[in-house]
Image (cartoon, helix red, strand yellow):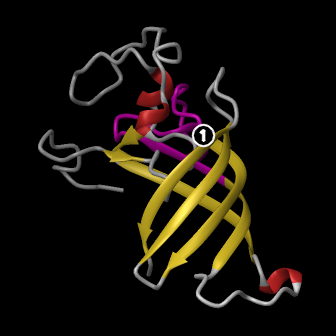
Amino acid sequence: GRYGADSEDPRLTPLFTGYQSLIRGYNSSSFSTIECARPIRNSSFLGLNSACPAFDQLFGSRMLIGNFELRFPLFQGFRLRHPAGVPPIQIALFFDAGVAWWSEGRALAVGGNRDPLNPVTSFGTTMRLNLFGAAIFQIDFVHPNNRPGQGWYFEFGLNPAF
C-alpha cells in the first residue's frame, strides 16, 4: 500500500490488482461493455465517474492479495522421463483473492464498510513453461468469481523468471 500525505497524489498511477501475476481473471483487456453497463457513483480519488464497477474495484492506493497454488512438474510428477531439449513445464491448480481500496474508506475484507470493495476471487488451472531461466510463459484457464456473465476463459502471459 501507499501511505502518507501524498499516497493518492494524482501524479501516481493507482495500484491495480488485475495483473495476471496478482489476481488471474481480471486483466484489463478481458472486460466487455456488457460488464460495464451499470453506472456507479463517483468512487475515484481522481474525481472520475466510472461506468464499470467490476473494473473500478480493482484500483486503489492499498491492496491485499493472497494466492494459493498446487504445482506439479509435468514429466517428473507422472514418472515420465523428461524429453531432451524441452524446457521444464509445471501444471498447477490455483485460487487467487484480493482487494484494493483508497484511504477514504476501508474494504470489507480488512474491517471496513465499503460495499463495492469486496474481495475478488478466481480459481482455475495453469501451465508454466520455463524459457531457459529468462522468462516464464504461462497459460491459465481461469474462472473469475466476481464477474457475472464472464465464465471460464484462457489467459496468456510472459513473466520474468526470478
Extreme-right residue of the structure: 79
Using the image as rendered, state which of residue 162 and residue 108 is in the foreground. 162
Give the vertical position of 103 relative to 94 (above or below).
above
Q: Which residue is mark 1?
A: 120
Residue 89 drawn above or below residue 85? above
Asked whether 97 falls inside the magenta stretch, the response is yes
The quarter of the displayed image where residue 134 is located: bottom left
**Could you tell me which residue is drawn at 30 percent across and 55 percent down?**
2
Q: Residue furthest front?
A: 84
User: Secondary structure under badge 1?
Assistant: strand
User: Residue at (45%, 43%) from the top-left corner?
Assistant: 100
At x 69%, y 63%, the residue is 68
Q: Quadrant of residue 9?
A: top left
Residue nearer the viewer, 145 or 84: 84
Which residues lie in the magenta part? Answer: 96-118
Dominant SS of magenta comes to: loop
Within the magenta stretch, is there residue 145?
no
Where is residue 119? Give x, y as percent: 59, 40
